[in-house]
Image: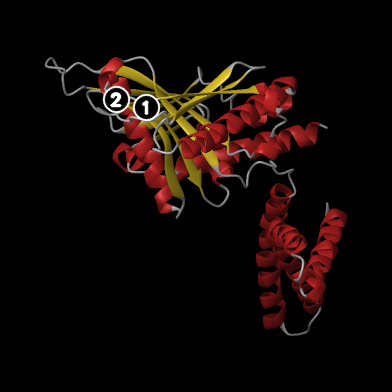
Amino acid sequence: MFAKLENLEHHFEDVEQQLSSPEVLGDQERYRKLTKAHSDLKEVVDAFRQYKELKRGTEENRELLADSDQEIRAMAMEEIKEGEAAMEQLEADLTLLLLPKDPLDDKNIIIEIRAGTGGEEAALFAGDLFRMYSRYAEGRGWKVEVMSLSEADAGGCKEVTALIAGSKAYSYLKYESGTHRVQRVPTTESQGRIHTSAATVAIMPEAEEADVDIRPEDLRFDVYRSSGPGGQSVNTTDSAVRVTHIPTGLVVSCQDEKSQHKNKAKALKVLYSRLLQAEQERLHAEQAENRRAQVGSGDRSERIRTYNFPQGRVTDHRVNLTLYKLDAVMEGDIQELIDALTTAARTEALKAQAAV
């Protein structure tokens, strides 16, 4: 491990040297790649340098154990204990930092939330989930852009698709895919009975055209007039766009914008992301070890979390974590859940690495 860390430190120093070169500063593409490489390496190199500094200090203190002054020996022994404990923690941190990184972690995400079983209550819950993720994103300084929205008559939404753009958004939210279940008393329930409803969440890395292999002849575009609730026309021009990926049969529609050009761009962005996600799922299915590292398959039919309103609790079934702060969670305070899922994924990755 330490030989690899030494090589990474040398590479980091080389990148720093290149970044100060006037030649690199004049080449924006090369500068962008080097800046990203510097950012990717900085955390592990900083931790390694801290480890080496602690190791030097500990070795110096060991020499002081032979000193004739008892106080100096006692002080040296205390600092050795502290240094060794800190080194042990840093060694564990470095092991995690050296795990292979998901190449998609830096991407923005496309989130799709759909009401499942439960009728009106499921639609209300789908709306609640979208608000939860929006609040979380806003708290991190990310941007949320609704790409398509189908509202339900009684409130909430039948389905919503949005772009969440921010630093490492996919790395934080990628484990949210699956079926989310809610248990609560609907406002329309006169007997006070608890109803169980569900909504599905899909988290996809935002994809560009370059991320997927699509031929122009694989796409079919249809334009039509946008319509509102009940079929009422809300647009007198053919601005809505439906794009079909012929080889897979995937269909994406967008009518939220008044401009046909903007609707087409949004529909393509969602299509690219769905195709990239489908390819990722295919690769995961071929590699059972990778599937375990994903903390569950992420399949939309898999019940991953339950939100129980009468008891004020939320339970993530993949990591057996229950939090009694449901109100805060629904306001976007989901970092504790995300951290637990990330830790579980890293633990599985370490086990898989040790087994190789």
Marks 2 and 1 in Cβ contact (< 8 Å): yes
Q: Is residue 87 above or below residue 257?
A: below
> What residue is shown with label 1?
226
Secondary structure of the residue carrying numbered label 2: loop
Q: How many marks?
A: 2
Local crowd size for mark 1, using a 10 Å CA cut-off: few (<14), some (14–19), many (≥20): many
| Image coords of residue 86 (percent x, y) | 66, 62
> What residue is shown with label 2?
233
Q: Is residue 71 above or below residue 332?
A: below
Regarding residue 333, the answer to whether it shows in the image is no
Quadrant of res 332 = top left
Point out which mark residue 236 bears. none
> Which one is in front, 128 or 306?
128
Q: Is residue 222 above or below residue 174?
A: above
> Which one is in front, 216 or 238?
238
Which residue occupies 50% across, 38% down? 261
- Tell me the CA gap for discs 2 and 1: 6 Å
| Image coords of residue 313 (percent x, y) | 33, 32
Does residue 64 appear left or right of residue 306 in this picture?
right
Q: Residue furthest front?
A: 237
Secondary structure of the residue carrying numbered label 1: loop
Q: Is residue 17 above or below residue 126?
A: below
Which residue occupies 58% across, 40% down? 342
Quadrant of res 43 = bottom right
Which residue occupies 84% across, 67% down? 14
| Image coords of residue 303 (percent x, y) | 47, 20
